[in-house]
Image (cartoon, grey):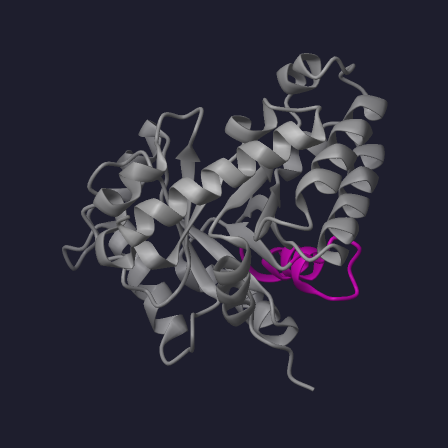
Amino acid sequence: MTPEPFGARLRRAMDTRGPLCVGIDPHASLLTSWGLDDDIAGLERFTRTVVEALADRVAVLKPQSAFFERFGSRGVAVLEKAVEEARAAGALVLMDAKRGDIGSTMGAYAATYLDKDSPLFSDAVTLSPYLGFGSLRPALDAAAVSGAGVFVLALTSNPEGAEVQRATAADGRSLAQLMLDHMAAENAGALPLGSVGAVVGATLGDAGVNLAINGPLLAPGIGAQGATPADLPAVFGDAVGNVVPSVSRGVLLHGPDVSGLREAAERFADEVRGAVSGS
């Protein structure tokens, strides 16, 4: 049986649970603010609490792999359990790993995050295309087989990104636009939404590119990085209905109280709905 594509599952989750992605980013400073030690026990407690609070109500949870990997194999084991439990509770899991390589190495990354037999299988993964969009083919193919998705870096919120992403390709397009055009080609004809998404920072002001890729647009930068839901229409224009705003510290700082986490996530989701609808 052909699995339901990620784009269709994401569209349904956004429509029913609200268009919001919450990051699971166990910074040492966040663990401290929760009264936890920066060790495996603290990591486990933090992660379990976020999943318990939010996995049954937000559309997407986005664990940042690096903050688990820093604890070695024990940290990865916590990440595996979090992915399993979040998906079981109905959240879509977007693994924020930003992988990018060529050939068999890219194939191994694809097997790690996009093969249903992997303990780290996720609904989607973030990828870096700046070894050439074609280098992502193993991941794109693996995602299509498993019904998963990918989010490809296009215009990121960090200031340094512009020196690469705003650079001009041989045909006059910016490299970011070139990557977005590749994504649009991958999503051509998909209904109701393609499964190849772009990462476009919510802090950019006017993105200055064509974002009509028929796919989701992950928008980091809401909350602690300075962007607000009210900024989304100016950045994303006509594509704002496909935006998945991502907030991490703006929600996580309200822990360890479960009700505090839930209330913060609900508040952001309501603000996003209002901004997207113009109400």
Determine the image quadrant of residue 172.
Answer: bottom left
* Identity of the residue furthest to the bottom in this view: 1
Residue at the spot 50% in from the left edge and 58% down from the top edge? 14
Residue 56 in the image: x percent, y percent?
A: 69, 51
Residue 144 in the image: x percent, y percent?
A: 57, 73
Residue 108 visible somewhere in the drawing:
yes
Q: Is 112 one of the magenta-colored residues?
A: yes
Tell me if 161 is positioned left or right of 252 in this view. left
Residue 27 in the image: x percent, y percent?
A: 63, 23
- 18 vs 189, nearest the viewer: 18
Tell me if 49 is positioned left or right of 131 in this view. right
What range is drawn magenta here? Answer: 101-122
- 82 vs 35, nearest the viewer: 35
Residue at the spot 61% in from the left edge and 72% down from the top edge? 147
Q: Is 110 one of the magenta-colored residues?
A: yes
- 58 vs 153, nearest the viewer: 58
Residue 77 in the image: x percent, y percent?
A: 83, 41
Determine the image quadrant of residue 97.
Answer: top right
- 6 vs 17, nearest the viewer: 17
Residue at the spot 66% in from the left edge and 24% down from the top edge? 255
